[in-house]
Amino acid sequence: MASPIRKILDLPNDSIKKTLFVALALCLVCSILVSAAAVMLKPLQDQNKALDKKKNILEIAGLMQEGKSIDELFSQIEPRIIDMTTGEYVTDVDVATYDQRKAANDPAQNIVLKAEDDIAGIKRRAKYTSVYLVKDGEKVKSIILPVHGYGLWSTLYGFLALESDAKTVVGLGFYEHAETPGLGGEVDNPGWRKKWVGKQVYNEAGDVVIRVIKGHVDSSTPNAESKVDGLSGATLTSRGVDNMLHYWLGKQGYTKYLNNIRKEGAM
Ligand SMILES: Cc1cc2nc3c(=O)[nH]c(=O)nc-3n(C[C@H](O)[C@H](O)[C@H](O)COP(=O)(O)O)c2cc1C
């Protein structure tokens, strides 16, 4: 006796039943292939994501070197986790697996920001944050801090690297955003990123003084060392970067941690 599938396949090619059957079978096969590929490639994607994050941290800290592997270069960096409320290191969380972005969306691990505090437009943030220390023996050479905030179209995610004085910029860069290429997307322009190197984010009194201004910084004006050129035609993204830094360097952000670093040195 012919199977039901055989019976359908034996129908003429222009029969509606056979056409629907072939279309459905094709959809089923394709969806199985796509799902299998997605599942099988997930570990590789996660691995590449982790490698990309390490590469970004190295680039922002100015530690990339030709001919050396990312893992080898990253071995000079010590990831740590801090409690944002106290600015102290936390030891009961696994640094290797802690996902700050996931934690920021988990009511058990986040705090919801009051509207008046939320200058970076992020709504909530994780209670614990990853930081990365570039060390020379026991001495901290630089501190790399994750930062994120809203630009014009998107939340920009990146890192700010500071020297061991916890106020001089080593680098600022973003690894994820959806600002317009050529406008807000110029945050990735190496020329603009270079302008950040050596800038002072705090004044002597400990106030956040870094500013992304509209236009060019005149080096003869007061506080030029704390001002960075805005992106032309992208004032809103520039303002987003400014707000983001004011949030993360401010009292809600890394102030306590950076004060601890200054007081206690390497920690
Ligand atoms: C299609 C389109 C994309 C834009 N993308 C951005 C952007 O990514 N970032 C930004 O700040 N402004 C962007 N703008 C411009 C803003 O709307 C706004 O005009 C600009 O930020 C003002 O900057 P300016 O004062 O330097 O001209 C875009 C405008 C258009 C029409």
Image: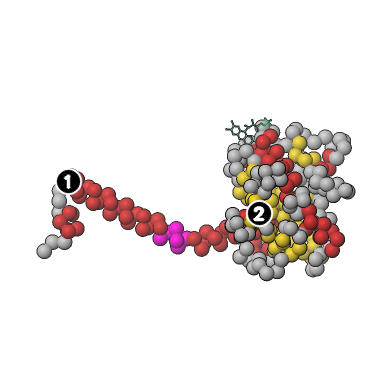
Q: Position of residue 190 (x, y in %)?
A: 69, 45
Answer whether residue 48 is magenta in the image: no
For the record, the magenta segment spans 36-41
Tag 2 secondary structure: strand
Residue in the picture at 23% in, 51% down: 21
Task: Pick whichever, 68 or 170, lies toward us.
Answer: 170
User: Quarter holding the N terminus?
Assistant: bottom left
Ligand 1 location (quadrant) = top right
Q: Is residue 52 visible?
A: no
Q: Which labelled disc corresponds to residue 15?
A: 1
Is 114 rendered above or below residue 88? above
Residue type at mark 2 is Ile
In whole angstroms, how far apart are the C-alphas of marks 1 and 2? 61 Å
Q: Quadrant of residue 142?
A: bottom right
Q: Position of residue 124 (x, y in %)?
A: 64, 50
Residue type at mark 1 is Ser
Whichever of callouts 1 and 2 sits on the residue coming sooner in the sequence is 1
Q: Callout 2: few (<14), some (14-19), or many (20+) C-alpha neighbours within 10 Å? A: some
Query: How was this image coloured?
Result: secondary structure
In the picture, measured across the screen, residue 17 lies left or right of residue 160, that is left
Q: Quadrant of residue 126?
A: bottom right
Magenta-drawn stretch, dominant element (helix, strand or loop):
helix
Q: Which labelled disc corresponds to residue 111?
A: 2
Outermost residue on the left side: it is 1
